[in-house]
Amino acid sequence: MIAIATVLFAFPLGFFLRNRLVAHITYIAIYGYCFTFQTLYLMRSWVGGSHEAFPADPNQLPIAYGVVTGGIYLVGNLLVALGYRVGSRRRTRAVDLDPVK
């Protein structure tokens, strides 16, 4: 779910919003909501007996899950920065509207 949200929202937020801080905060808010919902969904599966996302031992930390979600978070913030860079270049490109010189 967080990977889908990152692909759908990260680059467009950076591209269309003129303020980089607002773009990053908006992405963080979307990511935080999706991360919470995804973790809740996976936790319910874990309680039901699935050990695909989390280890079977409740005392063992799910490091792999943290690494994957942290990597997606990093990639998302990089996509926001890339979108902002591409968008700002496109907005500041000078166009000469005077055909006669």
Image (cartoon, rainbow, N blue to C red):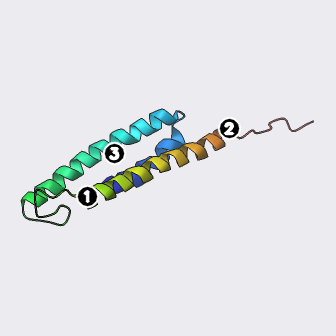
Viewer-nearest of labels 2 and 1?
A: 1
Q: Of the residues shown, which amino acid type is indicated by label 1?
A: Ile
The tag earlier along the polypeptide, 2 or 1, is 1
Point 40% across, 42% down: residue = 27
Point 38% across, 50% down: residue = 73
Q: What number is the disc on residue 31?
A: 3
Residue 4 visible: no
35 is higher (above) or lower (below) than 55: above
What is the crowding at mark 1: few (fewer than 14 residues within 10 Å), some, or many (at least 20)? few
Q: Of the residues shown, which amino acid type is indicated by label 3?
A: Tyr
Q: Of the residues shown, which amino acid type is indicated by label 2?
A: Thr
The CA span between labels 2 and 1 is 43 Å
Q: What number is the disc on residue 92?
A: 2
Task: State the image coordinates of residue 86 (x, y, percent, origin top left).
Answer: 60, 47
Q: Quadrant for the N terminus, please.
A: bottom left
The answer to whether 54 appears left or right of 96 in the picture is left
What is the crowding at mark 3: few (fewer than 14 residues within 10 Å), some, or many (at least 20)? many
Quarter location, residue 52: bottom left
Task: State the image coordinates of residue 56 (x, y, percent, origin top left).
Answer: 11, 64
What is the crowding at mark 2: few (fewer than 14 residues within 10 Å), some, or many (at least 20)? few
The answer to whether 17 appears left or right of 29 in the picture is right
Residue 58 visible: yes
Q: What number is the disc on residue 91?
A: none
The CA span between labels 3 and 1 is 19 Å
The answer to whether 45 appears left or right of 80 in the picture is left
Residue contact between numbered discs 2 and 1, judged by CB atoms under 8 Å = no
Residue of label 1:
63
In the image, 93 versus 46, the foreground residue is: 46
The CA span between labels 3 and 2 is 29 Å
